[in-house]
Image (cartoon, rainbow, N blue to C red):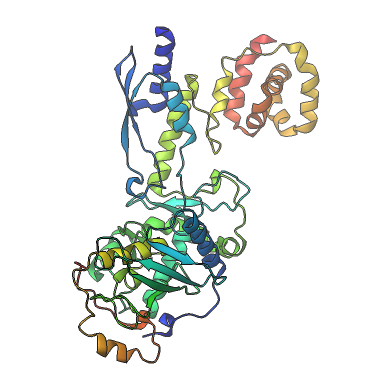
Amino acid sequence: MTSSSAPSRKVLSKIACNRLQKELVEWQVNPPAGFKHKVTDNLQRWVIEVNGAPGTLYANESYQLQVDFPENYPMEAPQVVFVPPAPLHPHIYSNGHICLDILYDSWSPAMTVSSICISILSMLSSSTVKQRPADNDRYVKNCRNGRSPKETRWWFHDDKV
Amino acid sequence: MAEEVAIEVEAVQAVYGEDCLVLDQFPPHLHVHIKPRTADVSSQQFVEAVLGIQAGSKEAVERLSTMNHPDGNCPLCLYPLFPEHKQNNILPFMKLMSCFHCFHSECIIRWWNWLQTQQEMDPDNSSSAIVQPSNEIEQQQGMHGMTEGSTGNCPVCRKVFHAKDIEHVLSLVGSHSLNLSSNGTEITDDEKLLHSDSEVTRRLKFEAMLKLQEENNGLIEPKKNGVIVPGMFLQRPITPPSALSAKGPTSEQQQRDPIIFSETSSSGSSSRASSTSEQRNLGMRRHRVRNSRKPVKQWVKKDNTPTN
């Protein structure tokens, strides 16, 4: 893999800054249901509280998403992980990495933090069983050096959950 | 009452031409084919529609005429495609012809270039939304003689678009992009909008229709980017101003605008006086008249000559 997919700690480009400020304003006016943006002064890392949707396996549970924006956002997808403890879900690894195509291969710059959040909540809500992915231990071990999920070559196979 | 309505129906017909089907003259019942661009509702973007209009058509026409540009925000930068306040950063917009989604030219080209770069860096990686079977790409090259037969996907709906869709913007944006991305400099008006071939055709059709409608004293305000300057043709019914009031403005005009003077003088001084005074008389329209093409001026001259 190339180094481009490493979690970028480079400062946001002006375009990325403008876009994120716009997103933040929009979020404040119209936040996605079930999410709370934890206010910080760091535009490049958002911490978002997720509340499991009522009537689903994750009702009354609360998790934290950490969203890190690369220099070239929105051309490049943000890195989105759950802050452990991550929800028990067939596509969420115990280190918080999320197997969700729009975060990697299927990213489009027309997506926003808000739309990502909705996708993640939808993924949680449609789960029928609370369990880790089958390869959880192996994967997490491979990521021990703090590897970004964006470096993983994900194989998206399950469109039901 | 019925007469007024008939006039309005006629006006709508003039405005919409073949797109307007009159079902009933009175009470008026019209079918008008329109192409609204409602960019802020993602599920209803750029759907074509047939409007059934019953009475009250005047207001509808006025609304449509002021909305003839995409509404809402660019899906990539989230800033308005067409800002209300012109002094703000205005980027030219374009739409992908495959799906009619609109973006700032600058923004979609940035995405396009990003995809290209990603592909060059890592052709095997499927992380870009650009993976297409190579035979299709070759077909594209064959068909259009393009050096770049690449495709991309619309960021909004993922529909495939081809390099030719945005080709006309690439060079222009390329030369402006540094400026634009660093400080979002102003681009003044519609003339900076970029259009694909089919959009240009559509606009030509629209302007022809507009011209027709202007000649019929229709309702729509002329668009600001008019090359045709429909106002020219409205002069016909205007009664020529008296020769007396023309004296002063004429000499004034001569000093200020020698080009017009030389053009008009070729056919005699008497006609010159009346044509320039008419410019004066038109007030707001004057600058258009001065910018206009020669043939139109000649027409004005001929018509006014008898008044002297």
The structure residue drawn at horizontal position 23% and vertical position 80%, both measured from the top left corner, is A133
Can the viewer see residue B137? Answer: no
Residue B222 in the image: above or below residue B196: above
Q: From the top left corner, tell me how far across and down residue A103 is, in percent.
A: 35, 71
Q: From the top left corner, tell me how far across and down residue A39 is, in percent.
A: 52, 67
The structure residue drawn at horizontal position 41% and vertical position 65%, both measured from the top left corner, is B112
Residue B229 in the image: above or below residue A40: above
The structure residue drawn at horizontal position 72% and vertical position 16%, both measured from the top left corner, is B270
Q: Residue furthest front?
A: A60
Q: From the top left corner, tell me how far across and down residue B103 is, in percent.
A: 44, 54
Can the viewer see residue A58? Answer: yes
- Quarter of the image where one finds residue B262: top right
Residue B114 versus residue A111: which sits nearer the camera? A111
The structure residue drawn at horizontal position 34% and vertical position 62%, both measured from the top left corner, is A118
Q: From the top left corner, tell me how far across and down residue B16 is, in percent.
A: 39, 27
In the image: residue B94, left or right of residue B232: left
Residue A40 versus residue B11: which sits nearer the camera? A40
In the image: residue A63, left or right of residue B281: left
Which quarter of the rendered picture does the C terminus of chain B lie within? Answer: top right
In the image: residue B2, left or right of residue A10: left
Residue A46 versus residue A16: which sits nearer the camera? A46
